[in-house]
Image: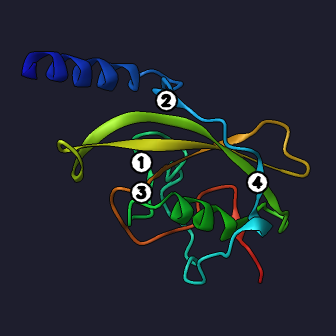
Amino acid sequence: MKKILLLLIVLLCLACGAKKPTILSSSSNPMATSLDYEPFIDVSEYSTDKEYGLVEDKPIKVGEKSAINQRRYIASLAGPEGQVLSFYRVGSCCPYASENGLSGTALVDVYSVTYKGLKKPIMLYISFYDFETLMIPEGFTKREI
């Protein structure tokens, strides 16, 4: 049984090494907007890492094992000109080692985010298993409240 679990984890890790991550579980979550959730008021610093939250191996870590925290984080953001964001959860991918995850492994949730004037959705990679100071990723601004 341990060998099967280890093999599964290895295969999942290899799947996320591709340019476009393999979605391990999908979602039927409806489209929401940043106006649908109360934003975090302390998300105000811009990340200096141009890949922060935009690639699977640098997820935004909102903590508390709370999908609501993921949505509140997105609600804290706006488009480059202050546009309201529309988003939905695509699914989960990209296992990584975490003492807070199931059997020491956590997954990253992928959200498709759009706003008026954006030609192609932006994928945000967010984990609720761990927490780090929340920053604003490249291409977004702080939502004005």
Q: Give, as a three-letter code, the residue at label 1.
A: Lys
| Label 2: how many Cα within 10 Å (few below 14, some 14–19, many 20+) | few
Element under label 4?
Answer: strand
Identify the residue under disc 1: 58
Residue at (83%, 68%) from the top-left corner? Answer: 82
For the rendered model, the colour scheme is rainbow
Q: Which residue is mark 4?
A: 32
Mark number, residue 128: 3
Q: Seen from this angle, which residue lies furthest left?
A: 2
Nearer the observer: mark 1 or 4; the answer is: 4
Could you give the CA–CA distance between mark 3 and mark 2, rounded to whole angstroms?
16 Å
Q: Residues within 10 Å of mark 3 (few under 14, many from 20)?
A: many
User: In terms of secondary structure, where does tag 3 sit?
Assistant: loop
Amino acid under label 3? Phe
Answer above or below: position of 128 versus 89: below
Judge by depth and name the residue closer to the eye, 66 or 58: 66
Going from N to C along the chain, the mark reached first, 1 or 4, is: 4
Residue furthest toward the right? 117
Among the two numbered marks 3 and 2 on one chain, the one whose residue lies closer to the N terminus: 2
Give x and y (percent) for residue 9: 24, 25
Q: Which label's residue is closer to the chain start, 2 or 4?
A: 2
Q: CA distance from mark 2 to mark 4?
A: 19 Å
**Disc 1 vs disc 2: which is toward the camera?**
2
Give the quarter of the figure containing the N terminus. Answer: top left
Above-or-below relation of 42 to 130: below
- Residue drawn at (76%, 66%), measured in percent from left and top? 36
Local packing at callout 1 (Cα closer than 10 Å; few below 14, some 14-19, many 20+) is some
Q: Which residue is mark 2?
A: 25
- Residue 111 lies in what quarter of the image? top right
